[in-house]
Amino acid sequence: MPYSHPQPLDRAEAFRQVRHLLPGAAALAALAGYVNSVVLGFFHTPVSHMTGAVSHLAIDIAIGRAADAVASVSIVLGFVSGAILSGIFVGAFKLIPNRTYGLVMMFEGLLLAAATGLLMARHRLGLPAVAMACGLQNAMTSSYCGLMIRTTHVTGTMTDIGVMIGHWIRHRHIDRTKLGFITTVVAAFGCGGWAGAFADARFGPQCLSLASLGCLVAGAVFWRITRDGFNGIPEATEPRPPRTTIFPEA
């Protein structure tokens, strides 16, 4: 898990306690799939996950495509920068619904708006801007309610689905609620990718403006409805726990 502090919500019950969790995760996964497909129409390297980006970087270096290698590096650095910003804004302490998540979503929308203009001008600086938006989103959902929900890629999610099916084949108990949840997220990512490819073929990079608008509106709505807590869950007020080190002293 990416966070070390105990979470305010019980993870086993989070899917049931927070009713907006499934539609929200599905919408964000569809958004990421949409964005990734649009950018793949502009450049050959994915921006919503780093496995393909690092692989393309290695290929670009191996065959001497310096300009493409620089673009791939910018994508990787953009994604990491987005995750860093999410860690700064959201942090690892108040991992319950609060206004910060709405602000992060609005910032993601601004990044996508900037990327739209840059890509429409055929400028590759739009690539790290989109990657930063994806890194920001993925890190944000990785902390939401203390859960590790991946919305910008499906590799780990598909692994979880396979493991759960394997357990079911062996007649072991599985959490069907979780299985349905992650299956829906994968399907949403795929549907978003299809919609992005279709939109890019007809309108080009300017169709990213739709994703930008969606993030801005959703972030503003979320910021508004969480002003006084969400679904009766108040913001955490307990003292911050003491700092810990990754490597204990000998």
Image: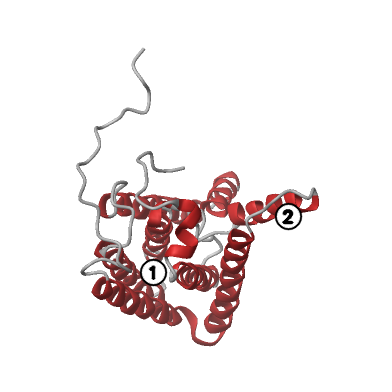
Would you name the residue on which mark 1 appears?
123
| x and y percentages locating residue 164 in the rendered image | 69, 52
Residue at 57% in and 45% down = 58
Would you name the residue on which mark 2 appears?
165
Give the vertical position of 188 relative to 206 (above or below).
above
Classify residue 180 as left or right of residue 133. Answer: right
The reply to whether residue 143 is visible in this rendering is no
Disc 1 packing (10 Å; few <14; some 14–19; many ≥20): few
Q: Nearer the viewer, residue 203 or 31?
A: 31
| x and y percentages locating residue 175 in the rendered image | 62, 56
User: Which mark is first along the chain, 2 or 1?
Assistant: 1
Classify residue 102 as left or right of residue 134. Answer: left
| Amino acid at the residue labelled 1 | His
Most extreme residue toward the top is: 250
| x and y percentages locating residue 52 in the rendered image | 57, 54
Most extreme residue toward the bottom is: 202
Element carrying mark 2 = helix
Per the model, the C-alpha gap separating discs 1 and 2 is 44 Å
Residue at 38% in and 80% down = 209
| x and y percentages locating residue 73 in the rendered image | 44, 50
